[in-house]
Image: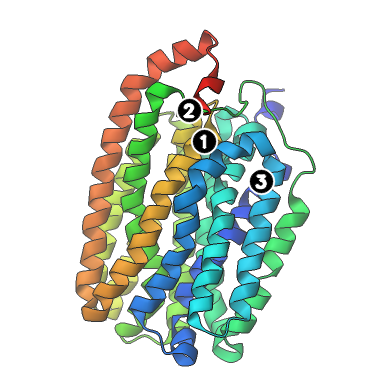
């Protein structure tokens, strides 16, 4: 019976992966299609970075609101909304006459991401036993390296021969498949109804958002400019696409291992998040060496460890905010979105001048993010115990909604 209660439900995890996967694929394609966009529209790293940054505007502006709205509109409705917005962005990108329209399509797809992650987190929190949160959130967050892998393989398999338009068109399959897997009714779990964040935990939630903003700055810049950066070292576009696939595969492995360990060692997930960011910074330093060998090793380390932490920070949010997982995710996603807005664009501008400076900037920002997450862990540790006692006494979280 204990094994039955602790079983991870496929009906929960499949949409929890496919919906965020559909949401992130457009953002990754902007980076991996860099050579094709340059051929068609004549854009370079700076413009590519701005196009990728447009994806982050919607989550930055609306993620906290959308996170809170998941509890009101229902998890299933929020998941469907996310998928339809992402599909709309892909359609617009496939028929875009200019790169400006590509950027607008990314904004639309980004709105889907603003719904996808809070809703998927709430789905996992409601449908998976707490003792399996570590591996469950690691599987859910595998959507990001899977998106990177799909976008990487799309270069040699589709884009090199058919162009970026057919690449986006083929990707329609992912949101359509995701729609078919979303449960017809929103799941609920005893003790995990979604409400507002308790007042004394709000500072900690925003510190987490600031910390992951720095991490996302470096990681999203890597995802956006990996192909262009690899080509700058002398690799072909096809080889760069396969390298991005390999980096995504290694990142997926790190996330799954970290999540599995987190279930067995119920320690402080934010500390582990900070540690992965710090290790990842070494990868960006290696990439700055601008040789093919150092770039290959560096991108594996940077993406594997420097972008291997999202499952852990989502796990930390689910454990620290058991009655407000979606709301806390919305705040954290605003931080992620800030990093995704600034990282690709600013690093793209640096790359137009010097790739070494660009990758070193990523390393420095990742280290800053690790330090901020250490502060967030300390703040939540101090605030959490009285908050838990207050919640057990039954105060109404509804006072915090407005």
* Image quarter (top left, top right, bottom left or bottom right) of the N terminus: top right
Q: Residue furthest top?
A: 393
- For the point 46% across and 47% down, the residue is 333
Return the residue at label 1: 327
Measured from the top left, where is residue 140 in percent x and y?
57, 48
- For the point 71% across and 45% down, the residue is 77
Q: Residues within 10 Å of mark 2 (few under 14, many from 20)?
A: many
Report whether residue 51 is seen.
yes
Q: Which sits in the foreground, 17 or 351?
A: 351
Q: Are marks 3 and 1 in contact (CB under 8 Å)?
A: no
* Res. 78 mark: 3
Q: Residues within 10 Å of mark 3 (few under 14, many from 20)?
A: many
Measured from the top left, where is residue 343 in percent x and y?
33, 62
- Quarter of the image for residue 11 reads top right
Find the distance from the CA under tag 3 to the CA under tag 2: 19 Å
* Res. 197 mark: 2
Find the distance from the CA under tag 3 to the CA under tag 1: 13 Å
Q: Which comes before the other along the chain, label 3 or label 1?
A: 3
Give the structural element (helix, strand or loop) at label 1.
helix
């Amino acid at each position: 019976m204990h094994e039955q209660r602790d079983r991870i439900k496929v009906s929960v995890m499949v949409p929890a992966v496919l919906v965020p996967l559909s949401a992130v694929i457009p953002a990754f394609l902007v980076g991996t299609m860099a050579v094709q966009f340059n051929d068609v529209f004549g854009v370079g790293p700076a413009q590519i970075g701005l196009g990728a940054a447009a994806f982050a505007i919607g989550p930055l502006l609306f993620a906290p609101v959308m996170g809170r709205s998941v509890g009101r509109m229902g998890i299933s409705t929020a998941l469907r909304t996310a998928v339809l917005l992402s599909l709309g962005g892909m359609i617009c990108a496939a028929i875009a006459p200019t790169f400006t329209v590509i950027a607008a399509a990314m904004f639309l797809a980004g709105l889907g991401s603003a719904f996808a992650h809070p809703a998927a987190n709430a789905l996992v929190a409601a449908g998976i036993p707490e003792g399996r949160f570590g591996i469950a959130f690691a599987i859910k967050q595998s959507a990001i390296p899977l998106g990177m892998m799909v976008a990487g393989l799309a270069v040699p398999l589709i884009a090199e021969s058919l162009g970026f338009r057919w690449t986006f068109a083929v990707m329609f399959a992912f949101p359509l498949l995701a729609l078919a897997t979303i449960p017809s009714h929103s799941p609920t779990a005893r003790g995990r109804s979604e409400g507002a964040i308790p007042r004394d935990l709000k500072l900690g939630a925003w510190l987490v958002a600031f910390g992951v903003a720095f991490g996302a700055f470096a990681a999203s810049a890597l995802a956006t400019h990996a192909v262009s950066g690899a080509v700058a070292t002398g690799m072909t576009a096809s080889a760069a696409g396969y390298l991005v696939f390999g980096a995504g595969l290694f990142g997926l492995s790190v996330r799954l291992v970290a999540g599995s360990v987190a279930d067995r060692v119920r320690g402080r997930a934010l500390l582990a998040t900070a540690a992965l960011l710090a290790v990842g910074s070494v990868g960006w330093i290696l990439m700055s060496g601008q040789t093919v060998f150092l770039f290959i090793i560096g991108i594996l380390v940077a993406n594997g460890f420097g972008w291997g932490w999202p499952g852990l920070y989502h796990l930390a949010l689910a454990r620290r905010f058991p009655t407000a997982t979606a709301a806390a995710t919305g705040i954290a996603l605003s931080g992620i979105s800030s990093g995704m807005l600034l990282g690709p664009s600013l690093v793209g501008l640096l790359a137009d001048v010097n790739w070494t400076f660009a990758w070193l900037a990523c390393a420095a920002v990742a280290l800053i993010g690790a330090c901020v997450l250490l502060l967030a862990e300390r703040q939540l540790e101090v605030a959490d115990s009285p908050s838990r006692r207050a919640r057990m006494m039954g105060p109404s979280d509804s006072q915090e909604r407005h």
